[in-house]
Each structure stands twice: as structure tokens, then as C-alpha cells.
Amino acid sequence: MDRIWQALEGASTTGSPFTPEAVLLSLLLAFVLGQALAWVYYFTHSGLSYSRSFVQSLILITVVVAMVMAVIGTSIITAVGLMGALAIIRFRNIVKDTRDIAFIFCSLVVGMAAGSQRYAVAVVGTIVLSLIAIYLYISGFGTHQPHNGFLRFTYRGQVAPDNPIIGVLKRFCGSFVLISAQDTGFGTSEVEYAYQLMIRNSAKSQQMLSELQRIEGLENVNLTMQERLLEV
């Protein structure tokens, strides 16, 4: 392991020529590190805009950028020519998540490091970026959810403080706020209620709905979670 690391450090400081063997090593290392970034993105993704093609693109971008750096080498003329060629291309795909943009930049930088034979920088950078992404995912850093659910139902009568509905909400929710209560307008005593909820354990949302369903006079229960919809 020490010999491998010494070889990586030596390649990154001596500026060895771009021989076929060096280019092949750069592309293989870019592929491996791109795979690592793609796996980290896959395991830490939590939104609704997941795309298989985007995950594969992270690997391809890393390898392509490494190849571009190998083509450029130390030639300024080649670099200017590639910049002009790339300026002709128009990318119309809209990136919806800023986190996806961050991973694209990671792939670009790792590919540049691998392609310019700065192998130690590429390896260390990939490890550090991956650890940061995993930490942010596990810790839930930046999460702010004062309410994570929206409950609507119709009930024949008024929901008093001692009503069974309030008892169920107290058991499953850390907090809940009444948003609106209005008559259905069909000449009945039914009232449509809307609550914002902070459910302690979202895995027990279905159990809470089942208990609400057993309450006499309560109908049309609808619970909307932040990223999913439960309806009975």
C-alpha cells in the first residue's frame, strides 16, 4: 500500500510525460473514482428527482474530463482549440437540484486531477468529498421541518379538546395546529378540518390513520406527507 501511495505522489509531482501507459492509468483511475462518487450519490440521494442517466453521467464525465486533460497535455494551442470546440455545444438539460450540480463539479475536478496525473489529489479529493456527502446525509444537516404532514378530514360536529381525534393526534404527533374548519355547505352538520402535523415517527402514519378511521362520524381522511401521499 505504501508503494502504491508513493507512486501516486511521485506521479503527481514529477509531471511525467503522457505515455500510453500513463493515459491508460489516468482513465482507469478516473473510472474508479467516478464510480465511487456515483455510488455515494446513489446511497445519499433522498429527493424525488432521481435519474439513472445522471448517475451514469457522473462516471462518464470523470473519464471524459480525464481524457480531455490528457489530450491537452502541456499544449496551450490544443487547450484553446478544445475551448472553442466545446463552446459550440449547447446543453439544454436543466439540473433541478443544486446538490446534483455539486456532484457534477466533483466529477469535473476529479477528472481533471486524474487526467493531469495528479493522482494523489484525485484520490484524496474523492475520499474527502465522499465522506462529507455521507456525513451530510447521515446527520441530516440543514433539515428544517416545523411540520411534516397535512391532515384533512370531515367530522359531524365540533372537535372539542376532549374529542377522541385530539387524543389520537397527541399520541402520534409532537405538535399539531388547526389550519381551518369550515362547513361542507351541503346542509349537514359535517365540518371539514385541516391540521398541520409534526408526526414523531412517520413509519406509524398508517397506524394513526387506522385509529382515526375507527372514530365514529369521521370520514374522508387524507394525510399528505412531505414527500409522499397516504390516503384512505
Image (cartoon, rainbow, N blue to C red):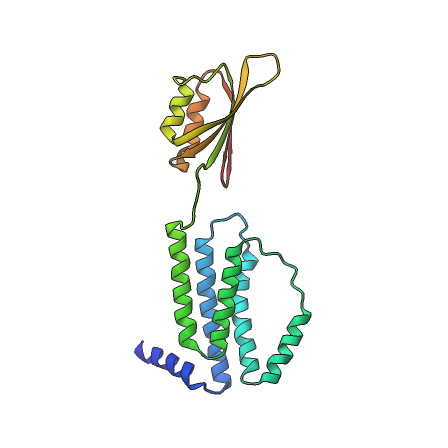
| Residue drawn where x is 38% and y is 61% of the image | 131
What residue appears at the point 58 percent right and 12 percent down from the top-left corner?
188
Residue with the most extreme right position: 88
Using the image as rendered, state which of residue 178 and residue 13 is in the foreground.
Answer: 178
Picture coordinates of residue 157, whole percent (x, y): 49, 14
- Residue 192 image position (x, y, % from top left): 54, 21
Percent position (x, y) of residue 83? 63, 75
Tell me how many marks there are.
Answer: 0
Residue at 38%, 35% (x, y): give it.
200
Which quadrant of the figure contains the N terminus?
bottom left
Q: Quadrant of residue 44?
A: bottom left
Q: Residue drawn 54% across and 78% down?
A: 69
Q: Is residue 228 left or right of residue 86?
A: left
Task: Give how far across and how far down residue 85 sits, in percent.
Answer: 66, 75
Outermost residue toward the left in this view: 2
Against 127, residue 69 (above or below) is below
Q: Is residue 67 above or below residue 165?
A: below
